Amino acid sequence: MQVKSLSVRLLLSAGLVLAAFFALASVVLEQGFRESAEQALKEKLQVHVYSLLSAAELKNSGDLSMPNGLPEPRFATPGSGLYGFIHSTKKNPVWRSPSAIGLNVTPPPELSAGNSAFLMAEHERYALHYAVIWKNVVGVEREYVFTVTEDAQFVSSQVEQFRKTLRVWLLALGLVLILIQLILLRWGIKPLRVIVKDLAAIEKGRKTHLDGDYATELEGLAGNLNAFINSERAHLERYRNALADLAHSLKTPLSILRGCADSFSANKETVKEQILRMDEIVEYQLQRAAAKGEHKTVGAVDLSAIIEKTAASLGKVYIDKNITFDITVPKQSLVYCDEGDLYEIAGNLMDNACKWCGSAVKVNVFLNQSKGRQNFAVLLEIEDDGPGIPAGKLAEILKRGVRADENIHGHGIGMAVVNELVGLLGGLLEGKKSETLYGMKWSVYLP
């Protein structure tokens, strides 16, 4: 079953990692405790070996004698779990403790005097073998191996108890860590829930854009989503306005044509005039829409490439003016908007500059600029050495159908389209006199 929830996936991943870690830690700790318990048993058996050595006596005849009473009472109790043996060099037992009556004797390994061996003997017993050379006062010398064994239950019971305690604590610790992980996870992905909540609010119309205080890693995503939302709204708004204005604008010419239908020859000039007017209206509304009908989604568009292509095309259109283009743009300047919108903005401004200039047009692009308290991704500046536009007429130029010079061919909607597109994209359009070419200078700030 596929898990779609990001929180569940992260929690399961953390749980599996914790489970693997605790399982490995349990094995390592248990093995460490077992080795520690075996070392403690070895030291304990070593003490018993020394007690047997202190109790043993080598007679003048060369026979080994052991007292009836030993320091450790368990040696005297059959089946107590603690057993003592003494072997000769031929590995024959010469003595066994009363507790070892009836037990099979395991021969000790080959050992040199003064060395010991701690082994797991038969019947699940630990055995400590210690080899000695014994010499009495008359000079009789014998070699013996003292062996003390203890049932493995001594270690096993401790290890089992430790295992149970360890599992309980590791389970409790694992549950606590998973709970902490869940709390941290919810806190960690809270910015995602916030941005999802804001998107839902935008979908329901309660918000217009993502304006929350998002995590640093999500600021780029929020900015791209806002650019996408603004672009989609800009397209929708332009479609609605263009269709509404087109229908309204064509109403009057169609009424005139309808009235002239009965006497076409008498109103031939009027019909031609209205057809031309309708053609202008259609062209106006199409330019106002300024977008491709097959628009799919907003991506990053390279403004520098658009400027280079536009300059090359305008150079051919205005070849008779021999225009000098001074273009300073970065190698790449990405803007998140529709490519058609960017062509409309840059194309109209550069076309106007070519139309009005004497012989020079200057284009600059700057990245990461600020205006007032707003930060913008790109600043586009277009200047010319033409007569410029008086400051008092700048506001009029941005209206639809208004031209700076009525003698110049055009519909007077280019700057209106630029102004509308820049506004819908959340940008800023400014016009003033150029400080270097002394003509017109347009500055376009785009987010």
Image (spheres, rainbow, N blue to C red):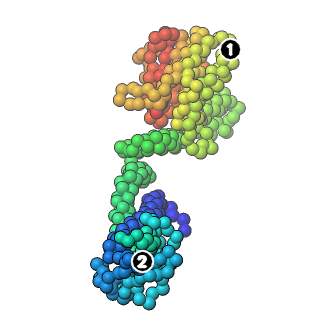
Query: Where is residue 330 drawn, in percent x and y?
Result: 55, 24
Disc number placed over residue 74 in the picture, else none = none
Query: Where is residue 174 drawn, in percent x and y?
Result: 38, 65
Residue 340 visible somewhere in the drawing: yes
Observer-nearest of 383 and 18: 18
Q: Which residue is mark 2?
A: 62
- The residue under the point 39% across, 48% down is 207
Disc number placed over residue 319 in the picture, else none = 1
Q: Is residue 409 above or below residue 26?
A: above
Observer-nearest of 273 and 214: 214
In the rendered view, does 71 fall on the left or right side of 149? left
Which quadrant: the N terminus? Answer: bottom right
- The residue under the point 46% across, 81% down is 93
Furthest residue in direction right, as rendered: 265
Query: Where is residue 27 drawn, in percent x and y?
Result: 45, 66
- The residue under the point 50% across, 42% down is 228
The amino acid at mark 2 is Gly
Where disc 1 sits, the SS reads: helix
Q: Is residue 5 above or below residue 302?
A: below
Mark 1 Cα within 10 Å, few/some/many (few <14, many 20+)? few
Mark 2 Cα within 10 Å, few/some/many (few <14, many 20+)? some
In the rendered view, does 12 fall on the left or right side of 312? left
Q: Quadrant of residue 351?
A: top right
Where disc 2 sits, the SS reads: loop
Residue 270 visible somewhere in the drawing: no
Q: Disc 1 or disc 2, which is closer to the eye?
A: 2
